Structures are given as C-alpha cells and as structure tokens.
Image (spheres, rainbow, N blue to C red):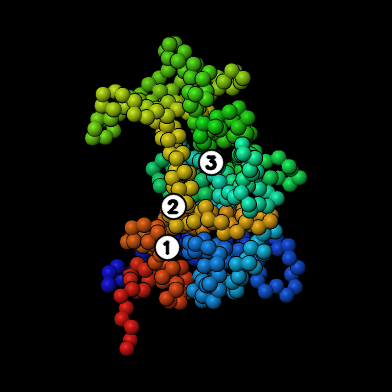
Amino acid sequence: MSGPAISPRTRRYLSADALFALLRQRFETVQDPRKQSHLTFTLPDVLASGLAMFSLKDPSLLAYGERHDDPSLKNVFGIKSIPSDTQFREILDPIEVDALNEAFADVFAELQRGGVLEQFRFLGDGYLVAIDGTGYFSSSNVRCENCLEKKSKDGSTRYAHQAVVAVLIHPKLSVVIPLAVEPIVKQDGETKNDCERNATKRLLKRIKKQHPMLKLTITEDGLSSNAPHIADCKEHGYHFILGAKPGDHAHLFEQVVDAGDQSRLHVIRTAKIDKKGSRSETQWAKQIPLNKSNPDLLVNYVGQSDLTADGDIKSMFSWVTDLGVTAETVLEIARGGRCRWRIENETFNTLKNQGYHFEHNYGHGKKNLSTVLLILMMLAFLVDQVQQACCPLFQAVLAKLKSRRNLWHRLHSAIESFVFQSYQAILEAILTDRCRYRTLPP
C-alpha cells in the first residue's frame, strides 16, 4: 500500500466541503416558483443534486439518478432526497438564473479572504480577466423559447445555446477562476437572436455589480477590439488588452507603419528563449487611432513576434490597449495578451475533454433548464479549480493519479464501494489507497 500516512492540510474555508456548504447557502436564496406545500424535493436539494452530478462527472442524468439512495452523496452534498431525472428537469426548468449566478461571487469572496488572489495580481494591484464565448447546445430538433436560431442555405434551422464566460487568469498560472457566466439567449419580449456583443455588455455590468472595487484588465480576441466594446470597458473603469489583426484593422496597422517611419515605434529584442536559439521581438507605439471611423479613439499598440535563430517569423501577435506602455511594462502586457488562450485551453477544452461532458445534453427544457445546468457545471468546475489552486490534499491526489480523468474515475469507484462523510475523506482514502488492494474476508 502506497501513499503518506497523513494527508496534507487543507485551508478550512477553501476546502471542497466548505465550498459545497457555501453554495448550498446560495441555493437557499433561489426562488422556487412551485407552491411550497407538500414538496417532496426542495429546490436547494435539487440544485445541490445538480452540483453533485457535475462534481462527480456523471455522464448523464440517468446515470446520476441511479445514485438516488447513495449515502455518501447525501452526506457530502447535504442532500436529503435525490429526484429522478424527469423530476430534476421539471423542477429546475422554470427557475430564474440571476440568484444562481451570484454563487460565483460567494466563492470569490472566500478566495479573497484566504489570500489566494494575491498570486493572480497583474501589473500592480489589478487582475487580468479573459472573456470569450462558447456554445454548449445545438440541435436541429430540440428547442425552447430562448434558443438562438440559425437558418442554413438549404432552409433548415438549427437551435443553439451559447454563453459568454469571464475567468480570472494569470500568465504564470494554469489555474483559472470563473467570475461569471452570461447566457446568449433571446431576451424577454425579443424575437431577434441575442448576440455575443450584447451578452458581453451584460456580463461586464454583472461583474461590476458583484465586484465594484475590483481593478480589472479585460483581454479578448480580435473581434472585441472595436469602439463600442472599448466604450463598455471604459464605462466600468476597466483597462483592456484586445487582440488586433492586420486583416481586420488595416487602418491601425497603417498607422503603426507610419509610427515606425517617424521613429515612434519602439522595439525590445530578447535573448534566445529556447535551445534552438529562438528569440522574441516586441514593438509598441502610443496614441494611435483605432480605425478611420473613430479617429479620436486613441489606443496603444503592442506587437510581439517569435523569431527563429535565422530571424524568420514563427508566430506574431498584436494587441491594442489603454494601459501605459513603457519599456518596463510592455513585456508583461504582451504576456497578458498571450495568456488569453487560457480561457480556451484551461477552461473550455478542459470542460469538453477532461471528463466534464460539457457538450453532452443533460436536458434542455422549455425555458431555463439548459442555462441552469451550464451554471451548475461551471460552479463544479470552479470548486475543482479552487482545489487545484490551494488545496494540498487535492493537489497530492491529482499528482498521484496523473490526470483529472483518473481522479474522477477513482472518485466514482470510491463512492460506489464505501460510505463517506465528506469529500475530504474521499480524497484521503484515495491518497492512502484505503479503497484499494483490500482482501475480502472469507
């Protein structure tokens, strides 16, 4: 039998068990539209059941429903009774999601309290937030009143749900902290499709309301570097590092060339950055018009190229920003812009490929079910990210098992075989192999 005899200590308020209890408190505030007399399943229990399903990475509601008598599940997540898959969908479909979305701020407050956010500091006392959109449901048959509709040339229609997600990131950290989720769905009374631009505007407003004193720098892809979106960022007092490509911002890059001709384009060349002799070259220019339509909107330009030992360009990146760009700050700004991909790799790709079943249809409903399930999955992902960031016990188990998929598999096996009182007890049993290599009595 391998593994240390004593498990690493876990921060009290940031353990998974503490966060599950915290989220349960938030679930208590979500309004239940049902009549309150003679309820077999309370709304907090049903929401906690959804959180449990995504925390344990069950592949479907039907598979989760088979656990309805599981004592470990009830102990760990504080659930008194677990509904069937049909009851689960019917209860969650009509609830409003705004109160549920506040749960991200609850966890964030605990991270502040525990000093975890210090490692996320970016350019002084602010933080870097990546925003991007993703789809999580698409069908040619299943639909609801909130579905986006896309008509093909052949006359067929696809129905979809998408969302804009904001996550706290840092160039030196692989962990991301989800801040908020904003669904891209038809708004009440609207017949036209919602769009990522409008959803992002609502998302920024939501983040500002939840964290009015937080100093943020928003980083996004090239589609976001336009005057209306920059105005939205400035309205909330946020800085920005937004991608900018020559094909989409021809006028901007003409101005960059002019800045070079006028000796206003500054350059820093780094020494070799790998064994092959590759190096990087970073350029910046100040106060350049974003485009012809907005000549008074001046931005700072930053570009960075990775070069081979022979000087050939391997890759090139460029951004516009309102941050003060100097020889002392430009490399950090470029690192901030380049780590925007963490919202794709460390967030969306993890959800899709590391056992979270992100693109599986757990249930669509007629109103809000799809969005409610998305938020519950993101909350389960948030708890996992917090554990990966600051729970030595979780870190030790993940290091032992080498991958998230192996960890989820062992969680399943442990709960199916033994009764546990807490998530910590499950992790300790896995770490010390108390759930394995046991000889059954004759």
| Residue 363 in view (yes/no) | yes
> On screen, 360 above or below 128?
below
Q: Name the residue type under label 3.
A: Asp
Name the residue: 62% across, 39% down: 154
Name the residue: 53% across, 72% down: 66
Q: CA distance from mark 3 to mark 1?
A: 27 Å
Q: Tag 2's secondary structure?
A: helix
> On screen, 327 above or below 372?
above
Percent across and percent down for residue 172 are 39, 43
Tell me the residue that label 3 is attached to: 132
Tell me the residue that label 2 is attached to: 353
Q: CA distance from mark 2 to mark 1?
A: 13 Å
Q: Which image quarter holds the N terminus?
A: bottom left
Tell me the residue that label 1 is attached to: 408
Q: Name the residue type under label 2.
A: Asn
> On screen, 427 above or below 374?
below
Q: Earlier in the sequence, mark 2 or mark 3?
A: 3
Q: Tag 3's secondary structure?
A: strand
Marks 2 and 1 close (CB-CB < 8 Å):
no
Residue 11 marker: none
Percent across and percent down for residue 185 are 65, 46
Q: Tag 1's secondary structure?
A: helix
